[in-house]
């Protein structure tokens, strides 16, 4: 796209910045193996929202620039991004489009709602503070820090903090059920806001699920966004039926988690988790016998790599 920038006929400087679950190491392998990657397209300029061309023109321009040399992939214009799907390779790249006076204060080109406040870098920074990973927002916007950023990425993947795993477990659960389950950003917020650390992942996940259930019951089933636009309820558009569906599925997961922790048979406990996490949770090595321990101890259910789920 960068080499076709002249086709866009805009005066703004064009920048690209990685965002989403790949940066936070919370990406999973979906059941259909269609990986979702995000790369923000930033038009950096000084025009106010009223002075800019319509949002649709930015979308049309990005579709044109991407599709100019793209005969292999399928290019689709969506409300929040332009999607480039490589169906044979089973992955797609979402290109959300932003206009920014500053990279740290962008507006999302959202069809049909024009310019919407959105700050994906702020969200990454919020999550990484929860993990206490030493992340710097400048990693994503300053070329001089590229080497330091790559080292940070390598380090967090090696460490694989438990909170990242909790997010992946919740996203795997959502992917297993599909349908009306919340998207990854909701699972990330719920896990981070209700995380219960423990040396064993099964115990941590069980308590985290219980905390999420209590949290949602106490606030009327809302999920406030912690970053710009701060306080926005990500469940606001959900019908009561959809909210009830999610709460019912959550209650069932909590009940299975309690049963798994209480079981002294590894195979039995594993199957309780597998009911909700699917084949991502292997039970082939679980012992089918009564043991003295009252918990199924496994350091990583899904695995220790970004693509392991």
Image (spheres, rainbow, N blue to C red):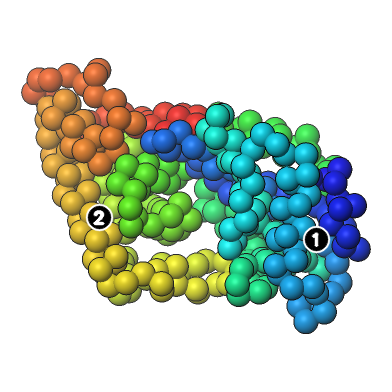
Q: Percent position (x, y) of residue 75?
A: 64, 46
Q: In the displayed orientation, state which residue is furthest to the bottom.
A: 50
Q: In the displayed orientation, state which residue is furthest to the left.
A: 290
Q: Please say if the residues under marks 2 and 1 sit with CB atoms less than 8 Å apart.
A: no
Residue displayed at 33% across by 37% down: 201
Foreground pick, 100 / 258: 100
Judge whether 225 appears above or below 197 on screen.
below
Q: Secondary structure at mark 1?
A: strand
**Real-space CA distance between mark 2 and mark 1, rounded to the nearest whole angstrom:** 40 Å
Identify the image quadrant of residue 53: bottom right
Q: Which residue is mark 2?
A: 250
Residue 43, disc? 1
First in sequence: mark 2 vs mark 1: 1
Front disc: 2 or 1? 1
Foreground pick, 110 / 301: 110
Q: In the displayed orientation, state which residue is furthest to the front.
A: 71
Q: Quadrant of the N terminus?
A: top right
Q: Secondary structure at mark 2?
A: helix
Q: Percent position (x, y) of residue 56?
A: 70, 67
Identify the image quadrant of residue 146: top right
Judge left or right: residue 100 versus residue 283.
right
Judge whether 16 appears above or below 79 on screen.
above
Judge left or right: residue 171 versus residue 70.
left
Question: Callout 1 environment at 10 Å: few (<14), some (14 to 19), or many (20+)?
Answer: many
Foreground pick, 6 / 234: 6
Residue displayed at 44% across by 72% down: 233
Q: Percent position (x, y) of residue 214?
A: 27, 64
């Amino acid at each position: 796209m960068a080499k076709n920038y002249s086709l866009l006929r805009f005066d703004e400087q064009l920048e690209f910045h990685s965002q989403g679950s790949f940066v936070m190491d919370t990406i999973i392998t979906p059941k259909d193996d269609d990986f979702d990657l995000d790369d923000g397209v930033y038009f950096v300029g000084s025009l106010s929202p009223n002075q800019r061309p319509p949002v649709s023109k930015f979308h049309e321009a990005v579709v044109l620039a991407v599709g100019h040399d793209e005969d292999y992939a399928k290019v689709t214009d969506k409300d929040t991004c332009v999607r480039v799907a490589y169906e044979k390779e089973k992955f797609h790249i979402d290109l959300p489009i932003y206009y920014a006076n500053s990279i740290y204060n962008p507006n999302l080109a959202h069809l049909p709602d024009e310019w919407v406040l959105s700050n994906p870098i702020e969200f990454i920074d919020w999550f990484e503070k929860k993990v206490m990973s030493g992340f710097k927002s400048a990693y994503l916007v300053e070329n001089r820090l590229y080497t330091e950023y790559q080292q940070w990425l390598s380090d967090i993947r090696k460490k694989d903090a438990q909170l990242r795993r909790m997010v992946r477990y919740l996203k795997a659960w959502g992917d297993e059920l599909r349908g009306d389950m919340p998207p990854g950003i909701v699972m990330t917020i719920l896990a981070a806001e209700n995380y219960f650390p423990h040396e064993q992942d099964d115990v941590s996940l069980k308590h985290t699920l219980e905390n999420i259930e209590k949290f949602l019951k106490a606030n009327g089933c809302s999920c406030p966004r912690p970053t710009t636009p701060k306080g926005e309820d990500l469940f606001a558009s959900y019908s009561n039926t959809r909210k009830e569906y999610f709460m019912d599925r959550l209650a069932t997961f909590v009940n299975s988690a309690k049963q798994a922790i209480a079981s002294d048979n590894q195979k039995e406990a594993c199957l309780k988790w597998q009911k909700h996490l699917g084949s991502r949770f292997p039970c082939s090595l679980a012992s089918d016998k009564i043991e003295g321990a009252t918990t199924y101890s496994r350091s990583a259910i899904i695995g220790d790599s970004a693509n392991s789920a």
